[in-house]
């Protein structure tokens, strides 16, 4: 049985940050990673350039049953702290949009940075750790394919259920249940919608077409691009909305955000009376989308000049354009979800240290906890911040 001061299960963003901070404090740290390498999700994120944080990180960008829980960790290790670490390693980066920071070259640089910091802090990393089992309380024994270990501090940084091909599993939730911690229902977040019937055929014909729109689900509204796919609807605004959507509910789409569509069409009728509806709309929307919308919603208006359409008809068209309700069949699920909603109930944990309130020395950090960020680097920042919070005390 090998003893360590800290055992961390999971070599992703949260686990590595925790390991670095604990190691810098002189703690003997062992990271047990199930796959063949650390940071797999970091490597594939942001199209291989890793959207590692967001300039506008604040608690309102996170979803949790307790929206106040994330405040402590986020305020003590901020986006500016992680940016400073990136700059210390000379990694070039840029802001893509809406505060999203990406590496100029490759996400491999972020993983290399974390590995270098781990090495400097004396952290021992073991990969290919399968068949992990935990026992004990206060002092924890961990057995796996790479050996038997013991520690007074055990950190669960095993992630959620999203993207199983990257090695995602329910280990963290199973372990939490083993210690009788409450788990909030999990679901895929930041995930494309699938549609059925007529709307599936509609989207399939438009596969690859995108436009700017405002998408509303429940109380949340997001204005970014939407993308039509052969399965349904994707793009940043749809992914954001998916985290708030519940099965059986509608989503509402405004295809002309910031524009009074009724005013636009009535003015077009006045200035170009012989013009067609599709001609007026293709100045603002992709032509393929306009044609499909006409076939779906206004087939009788396709070849009628604007002059021959009443203002009431044009207002009806405008209302559909700006308040288009669609009921998704489902989402694409964990296969393509960027994050897992729900998880270990924050009522079970200290917001300052991420330690279990009932089991001393047992910590949960990162995606396994019921804190989910919006799209755009927020989930990585939660990983850095929650990992740092635990790393300071383990």
Image: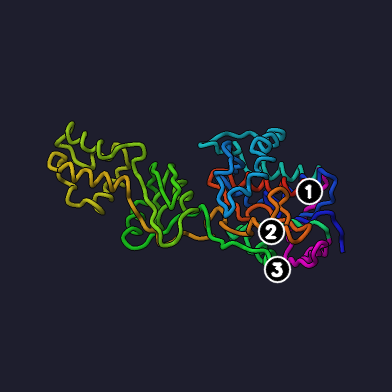
Q: Is residue 308 left or right of residue 357?
A: left
State the residue in front, 33 or 345.
345
Residue that badge 1 annotates: 393
Question: Crowdedness of circle 2 by 10 Å Cα count: few (<14), some, many (20+)?
Answer: some
Quadrant of the image occupied by residue 245 = bottom left
**How far apart are the alpha carbons under marks 1 and 3?**
23 Å
Give 27 or 163, whichever is nearer the viewer: 27
* Residue shown at the point (37%, 47%) measured from the top left: 209
Q: Is residue 92 above or below residue 355?
A: above
Q: Is residue 31 visible?
A: yes
Q: Tell me the residue that label 2 is attached to.
A: 35
Tell me whether circle 2 and circle 3 mark residues in contact (CB < 8 Å). no
Q: Main secondary structure of the magenta part?
A: strand
Q: Is residue 132 magenta?
A: yes
Q: Which residues are magenta?
A: 121-150
Looking at the image, is mark 1 or mark 3 earlier in the sequence?
3
- In this view, which residue lies farthest toward the left? 308
The x and y percentages for residue 41 are 62, 51
Residue 80 position in % (x across, y down): 65, 35
Asked if 98 appears above or below 242 in the picture, the reply is above
Residue 141 sits inside the magenta stretch? yes
Compared across the picture, whether 140 is left or right of 387 comes to right
Residue 178 numbered mark, or none: 3
User: Which quarter of the image is occupied by the N terminus?
Assistant: bottom right
């Amino acid at each position: 049985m090998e003893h360590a001061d800290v055992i961390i299960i999971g070599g992703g963003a949260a686990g590595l940050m925790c390991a670095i901070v604990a190691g810098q404090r002189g703690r003997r740290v062992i990271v047990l990673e199930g796959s063949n390498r650390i940071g797999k999700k970091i490597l594939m994120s942001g199209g291989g350039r890793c959207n590692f944080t967001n300039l506008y990180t604040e608690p309102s960008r996170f979803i949790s049953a307790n929206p106040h829980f994330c405040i402590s960790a986020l305020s003590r290790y901020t986006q500016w702290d992680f940016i400073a670490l990136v700059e210390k390693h000379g990694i070039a980066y840029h802001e893509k949009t809406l505060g999203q920071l990406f590496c100029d070259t490759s996400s491999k640089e972020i993983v290399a940075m974390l590995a270098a910091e781990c090495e400097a802090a004396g952290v021992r990393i073991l990969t290919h750790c399968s068949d992990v089992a935990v026992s004990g309380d206060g002092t924890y024994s961990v057995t796996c394919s790479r050996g038997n270990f013991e520690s007074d501090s055990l950190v669960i940084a095993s992630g959620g259920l999203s993207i199983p091909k990257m090695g995602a599993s329910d280990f963290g939730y199973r372990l939490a249940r083993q210690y009788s911690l409450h788990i909030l229902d999990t679901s895929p977040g930041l995930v494309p919608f699938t549609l059925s019937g007529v709307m599936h055929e509609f989207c399939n014909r438009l596969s690859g077409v995108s436009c700017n729109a405002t998408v509303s689900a429940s109380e949340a509204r997001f204005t970014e691009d939407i993308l039509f796919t052969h399965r349904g609807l994707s793009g940043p605004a749809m992914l954001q909305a998916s985290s708030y959507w519940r099965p059986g509910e509608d989503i509402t789409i405004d295809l002309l955000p910031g524009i009074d569509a009724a005013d636009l069409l009535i003015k077009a009728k006045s200035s170009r009376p012989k013009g067609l509806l599709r001609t007026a709309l293709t100045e603002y929307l992709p032509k393929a989308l306009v044609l499909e919308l006409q076939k779906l919603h206004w087939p009788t208006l396709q070849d009628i000049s604007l002059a021959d359409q009443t203002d009431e008809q044009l207002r009806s068209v405008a209302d559909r354009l700006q308040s288009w309700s669609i009921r998704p069949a489902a989402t694409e699920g964990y296969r393509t979800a960027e994050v897992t909603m729900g998880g270990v109930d924050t009522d079970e944990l200290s917001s300052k240290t991420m330690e279990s309130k009932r089991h001393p020395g047992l910590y949960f950090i990162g995606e396994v906890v019921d804190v989910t960020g919006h799209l755009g680097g927020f989930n990585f920042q939660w990983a850095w911040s929650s990992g740092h919070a635990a790393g300071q005390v383990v």
